[in-house]
Amino acid sequence: MTDDDAKEPTTDTFHYYIKPMFENAAISSINSRAVQKWVSSLVNEDYDSDTVRLAFAVFRGAVRYALDHEMLLKNPLAAVEVPKKEKRKANVLEPDEAVIRSFTLPASFMAWLKEHRQAQLEQRPRLGRDWADYDLVFSNEVGDPLQPNAYRALWKRVLTRAGMTGERMKMRPYDARHTVATLLLLQRTPSKVVTALSTCVHYCLRRLNLSIRD
């Protein structure tokens, strides 16, 4: 299956959720077992039902195209089970439950954040009124939120600079979270700090993922 099988505005979903599994698969080889394995992998990676159903809907569009053009003789989605749509209730903390969680970040990361902040402060005067002041830690060159394509391109550059190749180039930020936790533990960082930092990163990545989907 190639990029041509997915059209805008579904391209982002295709690249993020579908391409890692089916990029090198011949379309004639896609069967119900392979699709069910893919759906199950999304569920096991703790994506919510809305995300899994969205990815499946995009994939279904590509399959319909293949069926209409006789690239497939049988619908591989007929027997596939997808998670039911969840009715999520608001999970709001009571006033006495809402507390500020604090933890210590590694000194090297704090130094990088200070350099990053200084670079932003130097960029603002150059742009003047053209700077979008959303008070974002991570923004594009004019202060606006990062767009999905720019975010993915930035992440790919990070992997390339780190010397990643082959399967490692398919790593997601979620995967890197576990790597960071391992490295921090090897540096004898207190486990409570690692746990707190991992939880914070997980929450931020999920919010970023939701904003990209929206």
Image: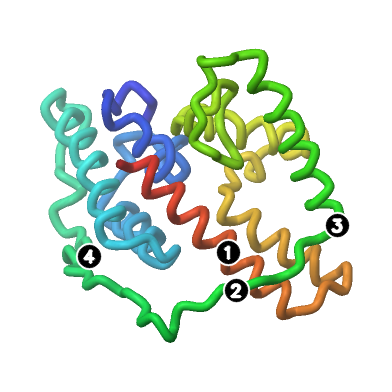
Q: Could you say where residue 171 lies in the image, as x and y percent from the top left?
A: 60, 47
Residue 3, quarter of the rendered image: top left
- Which residue is rendered at x = 18% and y = 50% of the image? 77
Q: Which label was assigned to residue 107?
A: 3
Question: As shown in the figure, which amino acid type bears the numbered disc 3?
Answer: Ala
Distance in Å between CA atoms under marks 1 and 2: 10 Å
- Up/down of 26 relative to 106, above or below: above
Considering only order in the chain, which callout, 4 or 1, is on the residue closer to the N terminus? 4
Q: In terms of secondary structure, where does tag 3 sit? A: helix
Q: Which residue is mark 1?
A: 200
Q: In terms of secondary structure, where does tag 4 sit? A: loop
Q: In terms of secondary structure, where does tag 2 sit? A: loop
Closer to the eye: label 4 or 2: 2
CB within 8 Å, label 1 to label 2:
yes
Question: As shown in the figure, which amino acid type bears the numbered disc 2?
Answer: Arg
Q: Is residue 108 left or right of residue 202?
A: right
Q: Quadrant of the N terminus?
A: top left
Mark 4 Cα shell of 10 Å, populated few (<14), some (14-19), many (≥20)? few
Considering only order in the chain, which callout, 3 or 2, is on the residue closer to the N terminus? 2
Closer to the eye: label 4 or 3: 3
- Which residue is rendered at x = 16% and y = 59% of the image? 79
Q: Which label was assigned to residue 83?
A: 4
Distance in Å between CA atoms under marks 4 and 2: 34 Å
Question: As shown in the figure, which amino acid type bears the numbered disc 4?
Answer: Pro
Q: Quadrant of the C terminus?
A: top left
Considering only order in the chain, which callout, 3 or 4, is on the residue closer to the N terminus? 4
